Image (cartoon, rainbow, N blue to C red):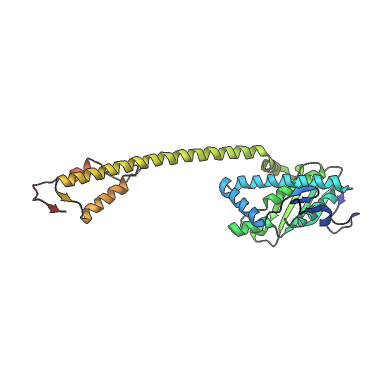
Amino acid sequence: MNRHARGLPRNDTPLQLAEVLDFRPDQGIIRLHEQRVVILSAAAMGLLRKELVETLGVETARRLLVRFGFADGYHDAVSLRDRSAWTRPEDGLRDGAELHTLEGIVRAEVVRIEHDRATGRFEQEVVWHDSYEAEQHLHHYGRSADPVCWSLVGYWSGYASACMGREVYFRERECLSQGHRACRAVGRDAEGWGDELRAIREDFQAASLGQEVERLREVVGRRVKELDRRERLLERRERELNLLRERVSRHAASRQFIVRSPAMDEVLEMAARVAPLDTAAAGDVSFRFDAVRLPQLLAPSRPRAPPLFA
């Protein structure tokens, strides 16, 4: 079994920023290991993350960011591999940790790497210091019960998979967002996850994301239809109330009433509150105001002297 950890001797020197970064200010281009990159603030990424969570829900946003990170990490590993001439996969894994640090994503510390070339067994433990993702989650949501460095988990899974030439998945065990001093993650080959493998693969498979988005679209569509139905019902009830008010006014005028008393104002106000309700669902409403009942309530029980102020 080959064992390689951060701090152990290597044949090559640590990755240097000048080796992988190329500024071209006259063209408005920045290249990192020969690939064009853009500089985005952590705050902007945190806001994007927040929008994903609030729009898609926590689980869908988590899976989306995991897959985004996987693609990013896999791409970085392939780009570095093509230009670095690694003598063993472990060297590429260390370069990945250094690259992630140079990119300002997180200060990565590789604690241990265990790789059995004969069986393909692989396990790596890494500590992430000052994760921007955990910091942004704390800023927007405060403490979390579960680890939240979703894109970092995806990145390291993709990067290690490219280096090892086989499926490797990371899971975060401790997170800054939970109150720990740093984030800690463990990566293993697919078989090494045992019974957990099926659930892990679902996080990385795009088909389930598409199904989830489609489900959310159906839910939103049903809610929009329900809101439209309620809006039409409210408009109908408002028209009924306006008609009721007109009839009450005409009835009061024909009976020579001037409807200004507090009692009559209270009756009309009650009618205004009751009219928009779906009386079939309002079990505590024993009657409704309409254009028939209210004039009956106003009908005189005996002759009246003209004009009377009610």
Q: Position of residue 222 (x, y in %)?
A: 48, 38
Residue reaching furthest bottom? Answer: 181
* Residue placed most toward the observer, 102 or 122: 102
- Image position, residue 118 (x, y; %): 87, 42
Residue 216 percent location from the top left of the image: 55, 40
Residue shown at 71% from the left, 42% from the top: 197
Q: Residue pushed farthest right?
A: 11
Q: Is residue 109 found left or right of 306 in the rendered image? A: right
- Say left or right for 246 vs 184: left
Quadrant housing residue 63: top right
What is the number of callouts on the image?
0
Query: Quadrant of the rendered structure where residue 183 is?
Result: bottom right
Left or right: where 26 falls relative to 82:
left
Q: Can residue 298 be seen in this view?
A: no
Q: Is residue 59 visible?
A: yes
Q: Residue at x 83, y 49 (%)?
A: 92
Q: Give whichever of 295, 38 is nearer the camera.
A: 38
Farthest residue in the front direction? Answer: 26
Residue 181 percent coordinates (x, y): 69, 62
Q: Residue at x 71, y 54 (%)?
A: 39
Judging depth in this view, the residue of 309 and 113 nearest the camera is: 309
Q: Is residue 143 above or below residue 71?
A: below
Q: In this view, does 174 lie to the left or right of 277?
A: right
**Residue 227 position by quadrant:** top left
